[in-house]
Image: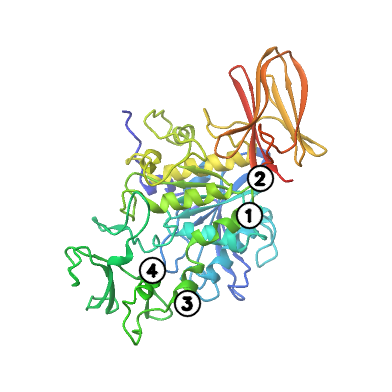
Amino acid sequence: MLKRIILSAACLTGLIFSQNSIITQVPSSAAGSKGIAVKIFYPDSARYGSAGAPVVISIPGGWNAGGITPLGVGYIDYGFIVIAFAMIGFDSGTYQSGGEYDVRGINCVTGLKDIALFAMGKIPDTSGKSINELVPNTVKACTTNVGFLGSSNGGNLAITAAGVFRKELGELAWIVNKESPVGKGMPTALAGWNLGGKTTINPAFNNTTGEFDFKTLKYTKITRPGLPSSTFYFDVNENGVLDPAVDFMTTPLRYEVAGSNTAFRWDELVILNAFKNGIVPAPVPDDVMDTNDVKEFWKYRNGANWVDSAVAGNPGLAFMVVANETDHAQSAPSHPHIVIQYNLFKNAGAFSRINPDRAYLEYVTGIPDPDAVDNMANADFGYTNITDALEKDGYERGLQEAAGICEMADRRHYDDYSVQLEEVISSSPSTTIGNEKYISLEDGLSLSYSRTAPVSINYQILEDDFIGLTVLNMQGKVVKTFVNKRQRSGKYSVHWDGKNDRGAVLSNGQYVIRLKAGKQERVKKVLLLQ
């Protein structure tokens, strides 16, 4: 096995944090007159040369208000513009964002939306300047290639913003999440957690089905330092008495609010099932939320609630979740938070990946590694086989994230959504003629397509060869075959009526046109609307 490169976060950021940066304020209805404190880090040269630098908005994890950190700044080394920001209501003296911090609620979601609009060039900063009026001319922002990088709980904020503001953020290019706790029960690690070197697994969670057995959920009152006296636990030995050495004790979300006060919010699944099972005492204790309050609280704090909306409003949105064998916070062997968010995006019709393509991981590490995972996009991964998709422990997660954003930005820039890559995507000259985008390739293959149904697919081959022209769905399955025979060199055209090989009308959404000639292959994504 090849030795993996281990780099600390300092290796990624180094002294770059104080270089090539601009501080400004972005206006937002959630931030009052101050706006949101934003720091823009820009590279010496743009990833796509004169076409500009893709923009990644770095979203920190956790639950408390935070300021601008060097998280992700090292990605400028790959030609990215990186935007870091201070959460709504944060004030360190150096960085100040207006408004009231609401623990990653709708205020924070609104703030992230406005930062994205600024990155896309749709709104200026508070001084009236656009992002491309702030960065040097040599590294202009590619405002059509803007993505979110959600670190841990930052991933919930990323998805929620994309879903709540599906209309405003309909041009968001991609989301890359790092082991984000997405899904009911996941933000509070209800299936099990890793904390301070200690691992606890909830026996009431079924790692084959992804379901909890709430019949064993119980209520009691105990004294725990820094926690409410009300306690919900899973009675593992079913003796009706809390045994901390055996039973799984749930932990509410603990966060600081205005001043020095501390507030707690129980997991939505815990509260709903506690009331359903009749285990909450009457009158309801002050430290237990009612069902309406718990639903409202988690509405904007769990990205799982907003995936369908995000993809419906932005069918071109691509998604990746970066995940290792050992999660930084969750301990359930089936990694339910990874399974949930991946399949939500995949089932909604989005281009979805677990972990970057091996070609991109090798690109950022600088060495080949045949042992690295190399998953196909939109492959079938569930609770029973998710471990096949996880990267082996040993890679610095910052490098995995770098590989992820490089891949997603390149896929957007070059419009290449192949389910599997053999190498890092490189440029091909392109021109636009009328309603068609024509891709001219140096190796003698070319492919163009119309953007509306019926889809007109034109292709050209320069040498006689065996040709395959097919349409695949986003799960990689061939749904329509046009050509599967030897053809002479020349130009050809076929028309696709939106039906599969059996003559059935296919649903609207993204598909991939694949042209193969011998060992050469070119693919292009198309959005079918009929």
Front position in the image: 222 or 501 = 501
Q: Rounded to the nearest whole Å, what is the CA distance between mark 4 and mark 1? A: 28 Å
Badge 4 or badge 1: first in the primary sequence: 4
Amino acid type at mark 4: Asp
Left or right placement of residue 114 versus residue 363 in this view = right
Badge 4 or badge 3: first in the primary sequence: 4
Q: Rounded to the nearest whole Å, what is the CA distance between mark 4 and mark 3? A: 13 Å
Which residue is disc 3 drawn over?
292
Q: Which mark is residue 507?
A: 2
Q: Which mark is residue 27?
A: none
Q: Residues within 10 Å of mark 2 (few under 14, many from 20)?
A: few
Which residue is disc 4 drawn over?
267
**Contact flag, marks 4 and 3 (Cβ < 8 Å):** no
Callout 3 secondary element: helix
Left or right placement of residue 352 versus residue 249 in this view = right
The answer to which image quadrant residue 254 occupies is bottom left
The picture places residue 177, in percent across and down from the top left corner, at: 47, 51
Q: Is residue 271 above or below residue 504?
A: below
Looking at the rendered image, the disc whose residue lies closer to the viewer, 3 or 2, is: 2
Callout 1 secondary element: helix
Badge 1 or badge 2: first in the primary sequence: 1
Which residue is painted at 46% across and 45% down in the image? 401
**Contact flag, marks 1 and 2 (Cβ < 8 Å):** no
Q: Rounded to the nearest whole Å, what is the CA distance between mark 3 and mark 2? A: 36 Å
